[in-house]
Image: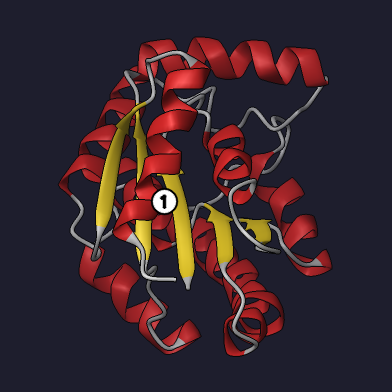
Amino acid sequence: MLIVFEGGEGAGKTSAMHALAATMDNPLLTREPGGTEEGLKLRALLLASDSPVWDPVAELLLMTAARVQHVNRVIRPALEAGRIVLCDRFIGSTLAYQGAGRGLDEAFILSLHRQAVGGLMPDLTILLDIDPRVGLARSARRLDAARSDEGKFEALDLAFHDRVRAAFLAQRLGKTIVVDASETQAEVQSAVRRAQSHLVI
């Protein structure tokens, strides 16, 4: 079973993912872009504040290249072994960021996804929804505390992040649970744990 956590910057996906993982027996936790050595190198190229300014199609292809390595080497083998996979971002983020955000055609993105990874889709998506103005402020504090340079998307204007949020809320990629990420961390984590009632494990 593949469970994906989606949402804009500062929504608290990683914390929520770990909260759900604590209720499960030996789940695999992973993220995109990343999850493999190659994916981590591409992550640096895509997310670092001083990384190149990619053409939107080039950015999509790099994200997809990271996903191919991730799915083929990590996610699919774990699923075939009967494990539950919890993933921070997947195709929903591509549709929101490179699609609505960058202006690429949704049909093109989905076609590429089908050809690249066989159209693998989540069994459940947990969407942590938050006003970008709140999320970006949270993300800025997190990046500063971690001394992280992964601020490429945080630096984009509010109009971009508003398009991303609207796209997430409009998506219909199977079973989706929307969680209000503006609540306290304890309330968000409680809502995420209740998501188990939607699963047949």
Residue 67: quadrant of the picture: bottom right
Q: Is residue 59 left or right of residue 118?
A: right
Residue 128 seen:
yes
Residue 7 seen:
no
Three-letter code, disc 1: Ser
Q: Residue at x 32, y 33 (%)?
A: 179
Q: Is residue 7 left or right of residue 72?
A: left
The crowd level at tag 1 (other Cα within 10 Å; few <14, some 14-19, many 20+) is many
Q: Is residue 42 left or right of residue 173?
A: right
Q: Of 114 and 185, which appears nearest the observer?
A: 185
* Residue 97 screen position, x and y as percent: 39, 46
Residue 57: quadrant of the picture: bottom left
Q: Residue at x 33, y 69 (%)?
A: 109
User: On screen, 62 above or below 171?
Assistant: below
Q: The residue tagged with tag 1: helix, strand or loop?
A: helix
- Would you name the residue on which mark 1 appears? 93
Q: Quadrant of the C terminus?
A: bottom left
* Residue 30 screen position, x and y as percent: 67, 58
Q: Of 24 and 97, which appears nearest the observer?
A: 24
* Residue 144 screen position, x and y as percent: 74, 13
Q: Residue at x 64, y 27 (%)?
A: 151
Q: Residue at x 49, y 84 (%)?
A: 117
Which colour assignment does the render follow?
secondary structure
User: On screen, 8 above or below 177?
Assistant: above
Q: How many marks?
A: 1
* Residue 88 screen position, x and y as percent: 56, 50
Q: Is residue 95 left or right of residue 90?
A: left
Q: Of 71 and 64, which appears nearest the observer?
A: 71
